[in-house]
Image (spheres, rainbow, N blue to C red):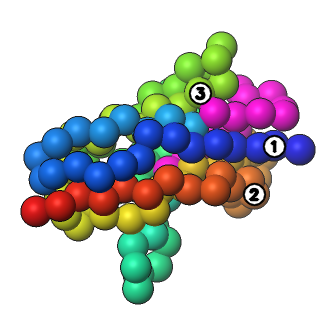
């Protein structure tokens, strides 16, 4: 069974930076794509960034040039570096895991709140 735990959220001002971490437990980390999703109040959950075991990344248009995703395959960790934060980045951020043989994010963390004040 895979377990994920996020950390690093908080309250910051517009223009500030935060780094979120996601630790992966339970299976072979290098067999999973890790995605970061976010959900703002009243909005649908959206995929923000994703990273394959080989390090290829996907970045949503809304965060390109501001958010950077990286992974540490030895430490079973994924980091989301968020720079130049905007109030519209305010959301609960979740990391999720998708086995490379599937197209579904099957495992989810509990989420971490990011609040950006103007």
Q: Mark 3 falls on what kind of element?
A: strand
Dividing the picture into quadrants, the one containing residue 73 is: top right
Dot 3 crowding, Cα within 10 Å, few <14, some 14–19, many 20+: some
**Marks 3/1: CA–CA distance:** 13 Å
User: Quick check: marks 1 and 2 in contact, CB under 8 Å?
Assistant: yes
User: Residue tagged by mark 2?
Assistant: 106
Q: Is residue 74 visible?
A: yes
Q: Is residue 103 visible?
A: no
Q: Disc 2 or disc 3, which is closer to the eye?
A: 3
Say which residue appears at 63% left-offset and 33% top-offset.
23
Q: In the rendered image of this protein, does residue 26 appear above or below residue 13?
A: above
Please provide percent x and percent y for residue 60: 34, 56
Is tag 1's residue or tag 2's residue first in the polypeptide sequence? 1
Q: Which mark is residue 77?
A: 3
Say which residue appears at 41% left-offset and 47% top-offset.
9
Q: Is 82 one of the magenta-colored residues?
A: no
Closest to the observer, 40 or 52: 40
Dot 1 crowding, Cα within 10 Å, few <14, some 14–19, many 20+: some
Q: Mark 1 falls on what kind of element?
A: loop
Q: Quadrant of the C terminus?
A: bottom left
Q: Quadrant of the N terminus?
A: top right
Say which residue appears at 57% left-offset and 43% top-offset.
6
């Amino acid at each position: 069974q895979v377990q994920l735990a996020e950390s690093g959220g908080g309250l910051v001002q517009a223009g500030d930076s935060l780094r979120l971490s996601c630790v992966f437990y339970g299976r072979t980390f290098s067999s999973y794509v890790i995605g970061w999703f976010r959900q703002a109040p009243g909005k649908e959950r959206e995929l923000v960034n994703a990273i394959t075991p080989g390090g290829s990344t996907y970045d949503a248009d809304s965060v390109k040039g501001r958010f950077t995703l990286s992974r540490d395959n030895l430490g079973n960790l994924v980091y989301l570096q968020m720079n130049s934060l905007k109030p519209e980045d305010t959301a609960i951020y979740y990391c999720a895991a998708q086995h490379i043989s599937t197209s579904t994010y099957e495992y989810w963390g509990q989420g971490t709140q990011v609040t950006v004040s103007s």
